[in-house]
Every structure is written in C-alpha cells, then in structure tokens.
Amino acid sequence: MAVLTARGSQFMLDGEPFQILSGAIHYFRVVPEYWEDRLLKLKACGFNTVETYVPWNMHEPQPGMYCFEGMADVEQFIRLAGSLGLHVIVRPSPYICAEWEFGGLPSWLLADDHLRLRCSDSAFLAHVDRYYDVLLPTLKPLLSTSGGPVIALQIENEYGSFGNDASYLQYLRDGMVRRGMDVLLFTSDGPTDHMLQAGSVPGHLATVNFGSGTEWAFAKLREYQAEEPLMCMEFWNGWFDHWGEPHHTREAEDVAKVLEEMLEAGASVNFYMFHGGTNFAFYNGANCQQKDQYEPTITSYDYDSLLSESGEPTAKFYAVREVLLWYSGSKKEDRSSELGDMVLPEPIGTAAYGRVEMAQRASLMQQLDALAIPVHRTNPEPMEKLGQDYGFISYWTRISGPRERQEFVVQEVRDRALVFVDGLLQGVLERGKAETAISFQVPAEGAELLILVENMGRINYGPYLRDPKGITEGVRHGFQFLYDWTIHCLPMTDLSGLSFAVLSELESSVRTVTEEPFFYRGSLHIEDVLDIKDTFLRLDGWTKGVAYVNGFNLGRYWNKGPQQTLYVPAPLLRLGENEIIIFELHGTADAAVMFVDQPDLG
C-alpha cells in the first residue's frame, strides 16, 4: 500500500499526485455481512477511499472491557476495504459526534461527577490512554506505513466547535505518535475563525466540513493554512432526522454541482455520508443547542445519501458517479465504456412478508424482577451511577396518605417518563415539554408510585454534551422530596426471562390498547432460504417502543414520525420461525405488524 504525504498544496501518494475521493461508511451502522456490498458500491461510484469513525462506546462498553467482534470488528472492515483496492481514512477520536449516542463517548464516564470531557482533565485522559493502548495497536498493522490501507488518521473531531484546549489536542497527537501512528494526521472543523483557531494542531493538516459555499469555505481555510492541500473532510450531501420533524432530502443536481466546485478547486473530498446505515438498538444520539430544546435522532441514518439505508443506489449515486467520471479524465464519448467497467454488485432484493399477528404478550410491570435485579437507593439515581448504559430504568416507591392533590415533579427527567400511581397511568413527562403537568391525591392507605424513564439518546454535539440519563436530581409531590426507592435497570439486552401468555386469554376484546407497557411476541415463518431478503417492519397502529427480530434490537419506533418503518437486513432472518418482539409503551389498536418491501422514512 502507498504512503500519503502533502507536498505544498498537493497530496502525494508514493511520490505521485493524488486526489482523495472518499465516502463515509460506518462499519458499526451496517451488519458485517453487507460490508463488502457497500464497499464495492463505493468503488463502483468512482471513489478511491473509504472513511469511518471509531466509536469508543461500542469498543469499551465498560471500563477495561473491550469488544472488537461482529459489528465492532473494525480491523476486519479495514482489511476488507484494502482487499478491494480502497484506501482508508480512520477517525478514532475519543469523540466522533456522528449523531451517535454521546458522540461515541462511553456513558460510564458520567459516573464520575468531577470528570470533565474533551479537555486536559487527568481522569479523562487516563481513560483515553487506556483505550488507546488497546485500540491503536490494532490499527498499527493496518497503516500504509506497515503495508496496510490506512492512509490518514484524525486527531480530534470538530474540536473547535466545542473547546479551545490546545494542550488537550497536543496530548492526543503525541499519544498517537508515541503509539506508532506514523501516517498523515489531520483535524477537521467548520470553516469559521473560532473553529479553525481552536481545532487545529500546528504542523498538521487542517480540513473543513461543509455542505455548500465551497469558495467561501476554502477561502477561510486558506487564511489559516496557506499552502497545504485543500480538503472537505465532511461534504454534507444529505442530513439526519429528529423525531417529529420532516424527513430531510436534497436534490441530486445540487450535490453534483457542489462536488464539481470542489473538484474545480483541485480539492479532495470525503462524502458524509456515502452510506448512512442504521442506528440499531439504542445507539442514536440527540441534539440540544439550547438547554430546553432536546431533539433525539431517529433510528434510520439513511441521511438521504448516495446509498439508501438498505444499500440501494439513489439518484445522488448516479449524479455523483457522472461527475467523478468526467473529472477522472474520461472523455464524454468514452464514458459509457467507463461505466461498464464500474460494475455494481447484484441487488440484494427485498421481500414483503405481510402481516404477522402478535399472539402473546407480557406485562413489564409484572415482570420487572425477571428483567433485572432490583437495587435500593435513598435517591432515584441516574443510570450511570448504577452501571447502566442504555434503554429504560424504573423507579418505585410508596407514598403515605392521605394527601391532598399536589403537583408531581421530576427534577429532572432524562428523557421521557411514564408516571403510574397504583398501576394507573397519570401522564407522560417529556424533557423540554414544559406544558406537561401531572398532579394527584393520595388516599388514606397510601399509594404505590412507579416511574418508567426512557433514555432516548445522549447528546452527541454542542455545549450540553454531559447528559446523564434517568432521574438526575429528585422526585417531589408538591414541595416534598420522596426518598427510599427500588430501582430496576432495564437495558433490554436480554428478554429471555420474560414469561408470555396467549393474548386471547388475557382479554376478550380485539383491541389491545392499554395504559401500561407490554411486550408482544409473534412469529414470522419463512419457508425457503431463497426467500430470505431485506424487509421493512411497519408498525401502523402502534405508538412508541422498541422492536426485536430474533433477539436483535432493530431500534426505536414512534408514531410521531417521520420514520414509519424499521429496516430489517436479511442476515438477521433465518429459515423457519423468526421471533418478533415489540416492546410497546402505550398500546396498539391492532396487535399485528406488517413486513413490507419498501421503506417509509416520511
């Protein structure tokens, strides 16, 4: 493999001028069985490089416990890319943003109230060092200087939009060099004065991120880096969605036009994203630019990019490929033959399996002890204090009576709480929704209070990055704080302890609308292995919850949209019976789901 350097304003690859034409594919958002398909499509579009982040929270889910298997096998992804003739850019910063949970930082960092994130805090750096002592040696043999495909590494990610601790950036840089990271090192930031001033590292390449305004963005970069190669490290050709917002789209012609502007300027480019993939399980992030404006990201990370969430080429794919062919030097009359050489893999195909009845259900409230060992605390502590990463957490206590009707207050809920008194739903408290109010009176015999809180994704960008989940302060009835809590941590990673009952035995009505959360279970039967294809789970009539196929957490659904289907990759399915479990928070008017052959992202 060749070594990337910078000579003046030109990238050089083993002494030859080189223009980086890269696209982002996150291995951790794609099932491993589809990595080759997505990489081959990247190459068929005319790209020579693939870029990926490395999420710390996936690789060190608990302090000193590491995972580099399955969807976390970054080494295999990089080796595969190299075997297909692609160069690789790796961005292994402690922080990645990426609309990923907590920006890739592990949630257990928040168990230490005194630790400060993304700065020269000694406790934070000690954790980074321990992680890098494991991660970076796995990357060393994959560097181009060792004969591998990795041509460049990022030092930190968009640091100028967060802080200005130059010693922190230098510490990360020195740690990389000390551990043998001897390929080209770079930073990436927005094209503004304060971001480039605070996010750059002297002596190393600075790149900029933008979606339009090419001339202005590169002019600003030139003010701070007069001679180095120009590169847009993140060309935002699409965008992500929050729950309750319209689905974002961008015209293919507009994307192609901005790409042409960059190529005309002689710049290199990395498409963010080439293929977005999916925020499976509970790995979606959230935004919060102002304290009371919490905006969780949806499950799909389709991003309106060149490949759809299920890996199908879009109009952008073909528009971009046409531009890349033109600028690669092929003449107009030769383009048809060039296109013939850029062969796409065979389509994977989709299937509409139709309606699946949810024949059984299990009450969450009745089976809390089957899902978690209860812990007792004076205060309703947040997830991180109890060693929990994601999912749900329940808090139970008993209130003496009688008491007059008073307002019920959670200080403060992160992020959405269902409040039950003696098993009856009193209302929903949602972060940032000040108009929600709950009040109740307590009878003479007292009452049982249960609060089920959902972690809807830790903030991944901005000034409110520190984002513990659950109940972070306390609970009041009126002005009186309530103490003595029984807590169940519900990461929802293992549902095998649940006991299901046949739905018809629980109620005679065909309607299954309830005021408490239930798990529903059904089975999808596939008779022929040739029928195992990608599909999309549609949940019309359901409200909010999480869906599982054969024990794999597909992610969240919510009827407020924009997303109306969940992507089910074919490798998650099997011949014969496939177990479908839906954890529904609010109930459904029809206990059945549909498997369709087309996505609906709003």
Image (cartoon, grey):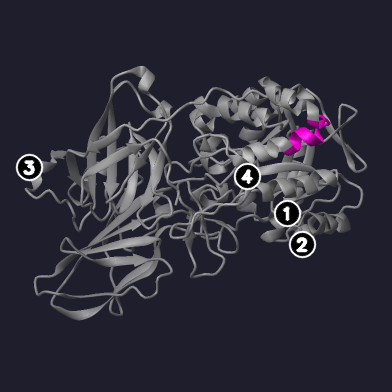
Q: CA distance from mark 4 to mark 1?
A: 21 Å
Which amino acid type is shown beneath numbered disc 1? Asp
The residue under label 1 is 189
The residue under label 3 is 505
Q: Residue at x 52, y 45 (%)?
A: 301
- Name the mark nearer the viewer: 3 or 1: 3
Q: Are marks 1 and 2 in contact (CB under 8 Å)?
A: yes
Residue 320 covered by magenta stretch: no
What range of the chain is rendered magenta?
323-332
Residue 383 pos. (x, y %): 40, 54
The quadrant the N terminus occupies is top right
Q: Residue at x 61, y 25 (%)?
A: 344
Please rate how many residues cluster around mark 1, counting C-alpha atoms within 10 Å: few if below 14, some from 14 to 19, many from 20.
many
The residue under label 2 is 192
- Name the mark nearer the viewer: 3 or 4: 3
Which element type, helix, strand or loop, lies under badge 3? Answer: helix
Which element type, helix, strand or loop, lies under badge 4? Answer: helix
Which amino acid type is shown beneath numbered disc 4? Val
Q: Earlier in the sequence, mark 4 or mark 2?
A: 4
